[in-house]
Image (cartoon, rainbow, N blue to C red):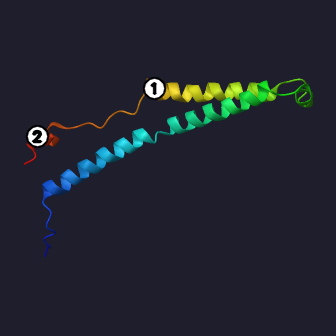
Amino acid sequence: MSEYSGYSEEDVQREVTELEHKSATAARIFDLRRIIGGLFVLYGIIVTIAGITDSDAEINKAQGVNINLWTGIGMLLLGLFFLAWLKLRPTPPPVVLPDEDESQVP
């Protein structure tokens, strides 16, 4: 014996489609490449500035290598790589099937 839930098959399908679109939008907004790239660029700028302002005594502690400068540049390059990857290969938009066209909704 089946119970009537009050929802038609079309209502359920429309709700599923709306949730899929919202999920795809959230995936594009919270793409890990954007978060990782942004953080590496931010920290890279901070560490590079610290490397530029290092004194001779701090550089001598690292056996003559300005480690903050080189690490900051590396972090900047890695962050820019992630952001370029995001720009060149974005998350594809959700596919709208012809039968899901909103002009057909009563």
- Residue on which the image places disc 2: 103
Residue under the image location 30 percent in, 38 percent down: 94
Q: Give the quarter of the image for residue 69.
A: top right
Left or right of 21, for residue 50: right
Give residue 87's mark.
1
**Residue 10 screen position, x and y as percent:** 13, 54
**Tag 2: amino acid:** Ser
Neighbourhood count class around disc 1 (C-alpha, 10 Å): few under 14, some 14–19, many 20 upward: few
Q: Where does the image place residue 61, in percent across and percent down from the top left? A: 91, 31
Quadrant of the image occupied by residue 78: top right
Q: In terms of secondary structure, where does tag 1 sit? A: helix
Compared across the picture, whether 85 is left or right of 46 comes to left
Q: Distance between the residues labelled 1 and 2?
A: 32 Å
Which residue: 56% across, 25% down? 81
Quarter of the image for the N terminus: give it. bottom left
Residue 82 in the image: x percent, y percent? Answer: 54, 29
Name the residue at 62% across, 34% down.
42
Mark 2 surroundings within 10 Å by alpha-carbon count, few (fewer than 14), some (14 through 19), many (20 or more):
few
* Proximity of marks 1 and 2: CB atoms separated by less than 8 Å: no
Extreme residue toward the bottom, this view: 1
- Seen in the picture, residue 30 relative to 11 is either above or below; the reply is above
**Image label count:** 2
Q: Which amino acid does label 1 sit on?
A: Lys
Q: In this view, does 31 lie to the left or right of 15?
A: right
